[in-house]
Amino acid sequence: MKKEYVLKIWRYAFVLTLLLTTWVRASATHIRAGEIIAEVLDCDGLKYKFTIIGYADTGSDVQFGGSVLDFGDGTDPLAFDSRDFQVRAGLGGEFDQVVFEVEHTFPSPGEYLVSFREFNRNAGVLNMINSVETPFYIETKILIDPVAGCNNSPLFLFPPIEKGIVGLKFTHNPVAWDADGDSLSYEIVINKQSRNKEVNGYRFPNDPKFGGKVEGGQALAKYEIDPVTGDLVWNSPGTAGEYSIALRVYEWRRLAGEWVQLGFVTRDIQIIVEETANSAPVIQQLPEMEIVAGETLKVTVKSTDPDGDPITMGAYGEMFEVEDESERPIFSPNGKDPQMPAGQATLEIEWTPSCSFIRKAPYSVLVRAHNNSSANRGFQETWSLWQIRVVAPKPDLISAERIATKAVRLKWADYVNQVNCEADQVEGAIAKIYRKIGMEERDGVQSTGGALFDYKLVGSTGAKQGYFDDNPELIYGATYKYRMVLEFANEYSGQTALSDPVTVTIDPDKQTGETAPVLTAVEVTETDATNGQVSVSWMAPFEADPQIYPEPYSYAVYRGEEGKEPDDFVKVGSAQSLTFEDRGLDTKSKSYRYFVLAETPGGKKTAKSGVGHTPWLEKVEHHTFIKFQWKAQSPWLAETATVYRDKVDASVPGAFLPIGTVKAGNEFLDKGEKGGLSLDENYRYYVKLSGSYGTLGLLEQMAKSQIIDAGLRPPLDCRPQIIFVRPVVYESKFWEYSGENQLAWLIQGDGQCDGLTYEIYFHPTSSVTEEFERVGSADMLSYTHFRYDNNLGCYYVIAKSSDGGVSKHSEVWCVTEDMILGLEKEPQSLINPNPASEQTEISFPSKERGKGFEVLVFTLSGKFLAQETGEVRTVPFVLDLDVFGAGVYLVKWRAGDSAGTERLVVKN
């Protein structure tokens, strides 16, 4: 299913032209960005063509030259000058695309790092030292391996010079295209000046030095890349100027079931950040879409401009680069960047992919909206990454036929003869079979990639073999739907679209007439530890042949506890009617499972019904809400769950009334929206599940849980008191901050506060506690939160007891930008180390001299031990340790306007 592409280095030059036409000329000197592309010329002969693509300022007095290309194979590096380069002058009037091509034959298979080094970079790059004197260096790694096969480097369809705006999120996507169909992954790296040396003084663009913050917020700027899509985000620039960044794109190929890295390309990128009042266009975000090969996808993408400026739109991706122009998407209005009316724009894309585009990985399309300000405010652009998955036409699932016993046989048409694709594109396919009970199709049933709501995978087989489903879960009287997909075994591992469903009802066996009763309800009717009761209901054997199963029937009811298999159930009673009351149970602490079978007057028994289950309801009590979860296994499709509670209506406080219904899931939160909730009241709850077998004429199925008591729980009187939230900042060539925050707190309370655990909650930008999320737990009075990207954010802590009690949360403490910028390295303790002596010294800040101080000492569990007061002097304060045993203590101090908390380690 391989698609033949032709690498055309020049094809995307027009993109740069469009991108740069409105840029103001920058006063720089030389090379700004670039990459090395490797193309196989003779796979067996180990011959490659390397293309060095660079970007330089138009009209610069400094020309490309003095360059060195090292093939990494021990041969002499290739030196060349400006006469060896081809120049595409006047790209936007500001930048030239400079290209050098060379062929090279490697001596043997192996891994080679091909590198290019050139003097000099352009001047004035903010995030490195002395860029104009810093060499420009890029590298590409290739793997020559007969087992892996031929391999070309990915080609980048979007140029590496981009524009950013102060205060607004910047995004870049290289639109990487791999001609061989290999999988790609992305990583941020540091720009280099030689093979083993990074540029001097490099700072990532979100370094606090540049003052950037998350767009619309106060958190420090973020700089990250999506390793799957290649979306690089800098949110957001804080200082106008020029920045150099680099990313690495890795190639992966699946060989013998393992992913093998074939190499990488390192791209050096330049971002030009400007100040402007121009607002960015707003572009419609498109969801991932699935298109069947041979069918036509038509999409209209809309964009609006808040300032009413004219908008230009375009789209870029590998499908636009195929050699056969008839297979490329069509734009309407015609052209890649059609000009639209001021303030709004639409871009219509139409694409009919052939079978050669079928693959597992989606195609990435970068949709661009770019405005042109009429008030000399520069231009702004917005990107939207859109993914399209191309699948083969759906298989023709012909029938689901009911055969012997409870089995079902599936048949489908021969796929190769069904679609207009070459045989080798669908050979070796595997059929995957999905099944669900019931007729209803919920939203999302045909989601991309074959994920099916309510369906479950029941088996797989060869594409031409058909499928025999004799799973014992099949139930007489139930109606099932089947669907299938084919997954291909070729190098791209694509798949078909999901088949249309076929339906079958499990009616009596055609040869033996075997059938079974249909279970309709399993309900806890009395909740008690010794006198609990469960009501089991059913229908007579489904469509029983009276000649084989003459009436009247007697029914045997079998029961098993949770975890028991049906063969281990025990008979608990008989009935002549269609209901059985199972008494003397512990329904308060146990859940039970049941099945029923019928017996004729002559002693002939039917098959077993499906196995029903009493739902098990559990609670989590809080001082503002009660959370309920339930477990249930039913032979039918559970469609809704309704939670009932007493004391909803004051006029009938003992009546159980519905307070909420869940259509999918097994969790409900009672916040008191119906009937209110009070700390002074205790409430009773149960959940009732309803569902269907999907067969006409069968009753609605029902399952009811035990009743449980629940109420709002008074908050645990052990509220944590945070004593510090402190960023830890390390000296590093990568970061001036670590993303590591230390928290410590105390507990004020009596003996009930012993043996607590603690949960830590966090939000990166908000102090609104409802938006916080749990990030960790601790069993002592401190915690370290590792965030990795930056330190900013807010915290609170709650205490929990072993019996489920929960305290009110602490006050919210935040790590601020001022705290970050005020630190240059890991904070140093004011408390001098204790060298196994009986005293330790505390050095207060010199600015507080002459002011009063207070020192408090606590155990790690929060027990107060000592207090000292005095006046800050030029000499340190001496704290006597003779009252403390060996261990770790918390020292909380305040001196004038300064305060803090430190750990004190006392040694023997």
Image: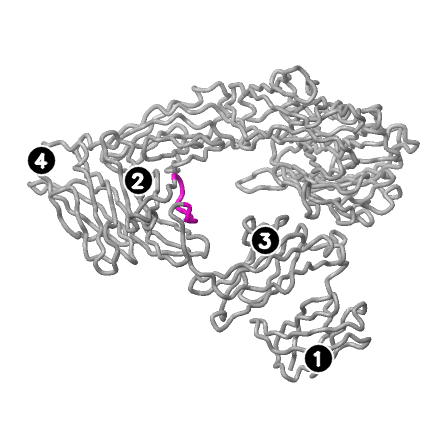
User: Which residue lies at the image location 42% right of the left edge and 46% below the top edge?
Assistant: 673
**Residue 290's x, y, as percent?**
52, 27
User: Label 3: how many residues lie within 10 Å, few (<14), some (14-19) or many (20+)?
Assistant: many
Q: Of marks 4 and 2, which one's residue comes earlier in the chain?
A: 4
Kindly state the secondary structure of the residue where label 1 is placed: strand
Kindly state the secondary structure of the residue where label 3 is placed: strand
Q: Amino acid at mark 1?
A: Leu
Kindly state the secondary structure of the residue where label 2 is placed: strand
The magenta region covers 663-673
Q: Of marks 3 and 4, which one's residue comes earlier in the chain?
A: 4
Q: Give the residue pinned by disc 1.
A: 879
User: Which residue lies at the image location 86% right of the left edge and 30% below the top edge?
Assistant: 25
Q: Amino acid at mark 4?
A: Pro
Q: Kindly indicate whether the residue at mark 3 contacts the one at mark 1 (C-beta within 8 angstroms).
A: no
Q: What secondary structure characterizes most of the magenta part?
A: loop
Residue 143 visible within the image? no
Q: Is residue 397 left or right of residue 590?
A: right
Q: Give the residue pinned by disc 2.
A: 690
Q: Which mark is residue 762?
A: 3
Q: Of marks 4 and 1, which one's residue comes earlier in the chain?
A: 4
